[in-house]
Image (spheres, rainbow, N blue to C red):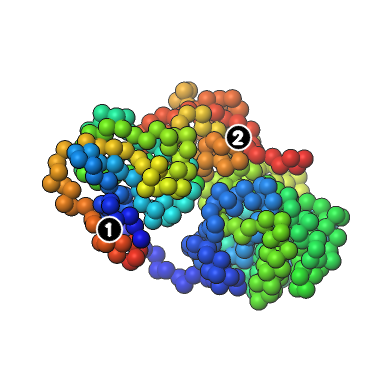
Amino acid sequence: MVPTDLRYTRDHEWVRIDGDSATVGVTAFAAEQLGDVVFVELPEAGRVLVRQAVFGVVESVKAVSDLFAPIAGAVEASNDALAGAPELVNADPYGIGWMIKLRISDAAELADLLDPATYEKLIAQA
Amino acid sequence: MTEAAAEPLHETALVDLHRSLGARLIEFGGWLMPVQYSGILDEHRAVRQRAGLFDLSHMGELFVEGPGAGDALAAALVSDPRKLTIGRAQYSMICADDGGIVDDLIVYRLGVERFLVVANAGNAAVVSDALTERIAGWDALLDDRSLATSLVAIQGPAAAAILATLTDVDLRSLRYYAIAEGMVGGVPSLVARTGYTGEDGFEVFTDWGRGPEVWAALASAGSAAGALPCGLGARDTLRLEAGMPLYGNELDRGTNPYEAGLGRVVKLEKPGDFVGREALERATREGISRRLVGLTVTGRGIARHGYPVRSHAGGIGVVTSGTQSPTLGRAIAMAYVNPADGEPGTILEVEVRDQGVAAEVVAMPFYRRPGG
């Protein structure tokens, strides 16, 4: 089961909404599909992202995957711990393996995110 | 975009075993093969520290037999298999008339008139056809047993101790690049001390249907030593650390052995003509326009297959293979660069997502096993 307190995207990212701030990461399904994550590249705080902008990259031993902004917003913080310990993405994708925090610029976009049940169905079909 | 008509994938005799072990299966060289089981890093480390088990049944096994087998192979390949003593092997290549590499191979001498040529899975049919054509004028016959042979490898520092419990082959006297007939776990086999990991290890050839027995025997004998089943993912990172080329990445029809740094494999001094001789002799006279080098990425990023390489002198090149080295903990790569940029210590730039990332040319291999 995926965590029920999060929203999701079709690109296998999760979003935790906390007031006007949103924390973004990749789902356990994505981490499993990627395999051992060995490199993560994240944006500097302050960068303004439009929805679906590539904001970073996560690389496993074999694959390179772009990270897409699930909603528009300004980057408040990036998870610096991933530079030295990219394996945290595999170990705890919904926790200390988080990627960025965004200041939500358009709350209306949140409605387009998937609820847990819908995302659960999506990965069941994958 | 048009897609080539998909041929049905070959499956090895071990495919059900892989599934039961939870392997992730992918298409490789026309075969459905395990890319990973527990995880590439886990498997990689098992081979470096203990042992790993590989299903390599996708490889092509071509037996060449007859009074003229040695001469036929010497005329077909760039090396000289006639120089092999019985029970020894050599790394070789089959080239086209223009000197381009058709495949890289291992040639084993099994008898006075009997050789085994092992080809890459994706090239096995092409090599089989080319060899058949090239040996036609000689008193030799080719028996393509690719689909009748299982190949299981055990690689790593514990490989010899594990295999020794299962075989009557005297492993202490079986040298690197040697092969012997014997039993493995009760199955008639050819046991070769070869591999593609940079570790000590063995490759066990058996009849197709008996591959699972050999695998099961090795897995059972290896479990106490911590041996793990390993997929193509770990095989790739292991061979890259060991500085070994992969056909399709470092080697292809548009590349000659000298560019790949494998000129030592070409025996221009051997008597008789061979396919590619004229072009390869010309290449030694005229020199090469690009050269394969090893890179360690000193900046932040991972160089990957296809990424451009630039030098301060204006040379351009391309990464052929690259990964984060599990053993070294840094990004390593192989790349073709201008020969002038190929000296160890030269600082180059790999273009990673539109940004220049510093990389240093280093001598290969990146990893050498202790005492190896």
Location of mark 2 (residue): B287
Type of residue at label 1? Pro
- Mark on residue A116? 1
Disc 2 crowd, CA 10 A, few/some/many (<14, 14-19, 20+): few
The foreground one among B321 and B102 is: B321
- The residue lying at 56 percent from left, 37 percent from top is B329
- x, y (%) of residue B197? 65, 49
- x, y (%) of residue A90? 45, 48
The mark closer to the camera, 2 or 1, is 1
- x, y (%) of residue B247? 56, 52
- Give the SS element for disc 1: helix
- With A116 as the anchor, is B133 left or right in this view? right
Disc 1 crowd, CA 10 A, few/some/many (<14, 14-19, 20+): some
- Give the SS element for disc 2: loop
Position of the N terminus of chain A by quadrant: bottom left
**Residue A119 shows in this picture:** yes
The outermost residue toward the bottom is B209
